[in-house]
Image (spheres, rainbow, N blue to C red):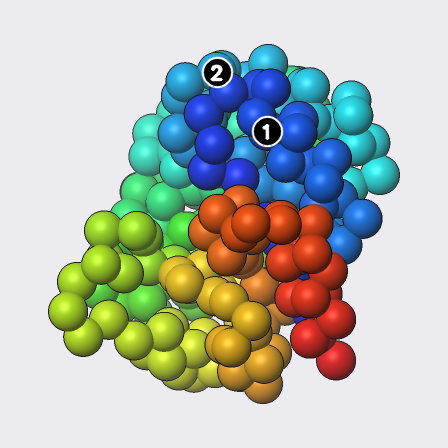
Amino acid sequence: MKLQVAMDVLTVEAALDLAGKVAESVDIIELGTPLIKNAGLSAVTAIKTAHPDKIIFADMKTMDAGELEADIAFNAGADLVSVLGSADDSTIAGAVKAATAHNKGVVVDLIGVADKVSRAKEARALGARFIEFHAGLDEQALPGYNLNVLLGAGEEARVPFSVAGGVNLSTIGAVQRAGADVAVVGGSIYSAEDPALAAKELKAAII
């Protein structure tokens, strides 16, 4: 299982600083949507230039113009881009078309999708490299939120998948046991007192 850091910081400088601390322990470096909206895709180029050996994930959360937005991100240096699972099939297919042209990949993010299992199978059939079972920060803050709901859906869907939604040192084992290909960790790394140590411990917890 790969470890992905979600960098929900807001500036290129902060992203470069965080990536420099954790790159040794992570496989995928994700530039969060707020970072891309605030700093632009130059942030993707900066991180890819600094860490050319890492998989760079531009969390575009594309909802329309799939081929165009994916093409822009790939040209900026992204290896993976995200498209929302709630987008039209044609949007996902367009992003996959761009990915194929660049020899890169599309991740379909199921944030806000009610029937995650069915949509995961559909998105995989459309050409997504893997599917992200994702609960956003707002959903995680709701009473009764439970990561196990995402893990169960991922297991049931039987597609290559990642999990994002409060993954930390105490839950990463369950994420791996559920069969996830990628564990996405945000706050447990970037909000840690020592992000480098936090990333190292998470990586060590993956068997």
**Residue in the picture at 63% in, 36% down:** 18
Residue drawn where x is 46% and y is 51% of the image: 187
Front position in the image: 34 or 133:
34
Mark 1, other Cα within 10 Å: few <14 / some 14–19 / many ≥20: many
Element on which disc 1 rests: helix
Give the x, y percent position of residue 196: 70, 50
Residue 138 appears anywhere in the view: yes
Residue type beneath disc 1:
Ala
- Placement of the N terminus among the 4 image quadrants: bottom right
Res. 144 image quadrant: bottom left
Image spot of residue 23 (x, y percent): 75, 44
In screen coordinates, is 92 left or right of 53? left
Asked if the residue under mark 2 is in contact with the one under mark 1, i.e. CB atoms within 8 Å, the reply is: yes
Q: Viewer-proximal residue, 62 or 199?
A: 199
Q: Which residue is mark 2?
A: 39
Q: 183 or 143: nearer the eye?
A: 143
Residue 51 drawn at (x, y percent): 79, 32
Q: Which residue: 50% across, 57% down?
A: 188
Please tell me whether residue 164 is drawn above or below residue 19 in the rendered image. Answer: below
Number of the label disc, if any, that sits on residue 15: 1
Q: CA distance from mark 1 to mark 2?
A: 10 Å
Q: Which comes before the other along the chain, label 1 or label 2?
A: 1
